[in-house]
Image: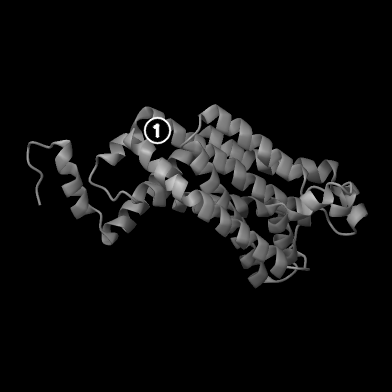
Amino acid sequence: MTVTTRGTVAELPMVFGRTETVWRLVPQTLIQTRRLLLRWRRDPLTMVQSLIFPALLLVVLDTVLGKQISMFSGVSALYGSVPMVALVAVMSGSVAGAVTLGREREQGLLARFWVLPVHRGSGLAARIAAEGARILLCTLVLFGVGVALGFRFEQGPLAGIALFGVPLLYGLGFATLVTAAAVYSAKTALVEAVSLGTSLMMFFSTGFVPLAAYPSWAQPIVRHQPMTYAIEAMRGLSLGGAVRAPLLATIAWTVGTLALFGVPAAIGYRRASRA
């Protein structure tokens, strides 16, 4: 089909109707995923928040608190701090991705994509795929730093492979939440609110210090917040211990977050693209 020279807005739905097929969704999603990954790689903010800051944080925590926490708990503090910092990198990278989304909306790039003959779902699908690739890469790098500091996969290679699925699972749920917030709120307010929330979650988790080190009033909060569940699942897959209960809780949190924020994120992304 060829588009007539009139090229009116009214004719665009007909063009998109021919374009929005499943067989075009996959290649167009891959192209946009590559675009996002290249942009994030060249963005200093994303690199700092996703890799450099978490890696430095891990080294500082191990240097300053590692010995004391290890003496208190009886095992290396790295089995808590490495998973915790990996999740911090997941959340920080999602915030950086949300900032990039806000910039593209302000610059009109999303609107330009909207009027092109591409599958309408490819933009959001590409962001999900790019988030997954970023999460896996950041997790690999940070666990590599952890191994250099003394972290070991005590439960074997299969458990080690399964361990990398926990940050991915947690991160996709968190990225959905942040994306929904990004398309409905101001960029500055989003960064401040999410940064405060992630800092509180980090300090009130079993990856920072063992549960027994918190006061009695804070222990229920620490025990049942989603970050602690993910940390405990990764601790069990690396050092040993309970895996099923914290992993099921992480899955439940992710599914609940996707169910609650998935549709608002899709609707908000559509509105941002048409603005």
Establish if 170 lies above or below 93. Answer: below
Question: Is residue 42 in sight in this rendering?
Answer: no
Tally of numbered discs: 1
Question: Which residue is painted at 42% across and 47% down in the image?
Answer: 266
Q: Measuring from the top left, give residue 35's x and y in whole percent.
A: 39, 44
Establish if 185 lies above or below 208. Answer: above
Most extreme residue toward the right is: 71
Q: Measuring from the top left, give residue 220's x and y in whole percent.
A: 80, 52
Question: Is residue 270 in sight in this rendering?
Answer: yes
Q: Measuring from the top left, give residue 150's x and y in whole percent.
A: 78, 56
In this figure, which residue is indicated by the disc labeled 1?
A: 105
Q: Measuring from the top left, give residue 47's x and y in whole percent.
A: 56, 38
Question: Which residue is painted at 82% across and 43% down in the image?
Answer: 63
Most extreme residue toward the left is: 5
Question: Which residue is painted at 45% across and 33% down in the image?
Answer: 102
Secondary structure category for the residue under label 1 = helix
Of 105 and 55, the residue lying toward us = 105
Q: Amino acid at mark 1?
A: Arg
Mark 1 neighbour density, 10 Å: few (under 14) some (14–19) many (20 or more): some
Establish if 61 lies above or below 157. Answer: above
Q: Within the image, what quadrant is residue 246 found in? A: bottom right
Of 70 and 118, the residue lying toward us = 118
